[in-house]
Image (tube, rainbow, N blue to C red):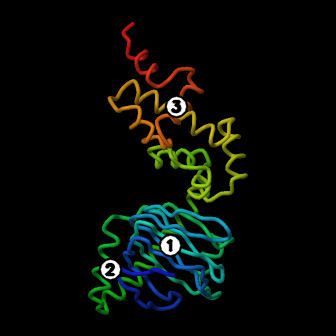
Amino acid sequence: MDNFSIVTGAMIQLSSPFRLIHVIKRLPDFQLRPHSHNFFHIIFVTSGTLEVDIKGSTHIIHENHAVILPPYVPHALNSKKGYCQIGVDIFDTEENDLCALLNQTFPSGFSIVKMHLLPTHFEEMIKSVRDLTKLNLLKLQNNAEALVLSFIEQASDTADKSFRDRFLDMIAHDDGLTFTLPQMCSYLNISKTHLERLVHDEFECSAVEYYNKLKIMKACFLLQNSESSIRDISEKLGFYDESHFTRFFKKSMGITPSNYRNTSRTPL
């Protein structure tokens, strides 16, 4: 059963080529079963996370990211903890320059782009939809166009950015180094095969191997420079439990985490 309750916000009809703007805060356990529509739907996630199931894959849309969902392609939406969004619907009309830009920039129709939305963006739009004067309606129309143009511009900039920079940006975002391989693919919006090839070209190892090297480096740093327990460190780095972390660490370093901590802190 679908659960698409709204805590606050509204859907406002706009002038062509737009259909609606959705300024919405969704409740936890939000679900919308597979569906499709005859327009582009762009979702700007301003807080929380949204899962999109499309073409047999699940993509996680993080805060300050946006996703474009193409016309006539079935997809499902889910969010365990809820999220806030600014959504924009755009009819795919050939005579409109904005639609032409969307089709040119996103030939496959689906894409995820990191955005730089101000924290006040959502709150300002909520105020506008609650007080829908003619002035505020015009502001919403202009804001919708500005957001879509920014989305296109950011996507174009991202396309020019090297894979190495994008991969390192992802690592910086994943503070606990807990991303799985499917989550890496989702974040970077590329296939597993493509990801592994690019990582091997850049770092001469697989994506998981590179992540494991970073985990070992971070574990060594925490063991030597913090008072965190072995259990806390294992949880922070995404291991199932302390014993799993200990086996992983010993396999790589030839010594247990406890022995490493004691040895590294022993004065020369």
Give the residue displayed 43% in from the left and 15% down from the top.
Answer: 263
Whole-Å distance between the Cαs marked 1 and 3?
42 Å
Residue 98 appears in which quarter of the rendering?
bottom right
**Residue matched to label 2:** 8
Whole-Å distance between the Cαs marked 2 and 1?
26 Å
Q: Is residue 215 above or below residue 185?
A: above
Of the two numbered discs 2 and 1 on the same chain, state the one appearing first in sequence: 2
- Mark 1 vs mark 3: in front: 3
Residue type for callout 1: Leu
The quadrant in which the C terminus is found is top left
**Residue matched to label 3:** 216
Give the residue displayed 45% in from the left and 44% down from the top.
Answer: 176
Residue type for callout 2: Thr
Residue type for callout 3: Ile
Give the residue displayed 45% in from the left and 67% down from the top.
Answer: 80
Q: Position of residue 191 (x, y in %)?
A: 68, 57
Mark 3 residue element: helix
Of the two numbered discs 2 and 3 on the same chain, state the one appearing first in sequence: 2
Q: Is residue 141 above or below residue 193?
A: below
Q: Position of residue 245 (x, y in %)?
A: 51, 34
Front position in the image: 207 or 145: 207
* Disc ID at residue 106: none
Mark 2 residue crowding within 10 angstroms, few (<14) / some (14–19) / many (20+): few
Give the residue displayed 46% in from the left and 35% down from the top.
Answer: 242
Q: Is residue 53 above or below residue 194?
A: below
Q: Position of residue 227 (x, y in %)?
A: 32, 29
**Residue matched to label 1:** 149
Mark 1 residue element: helix
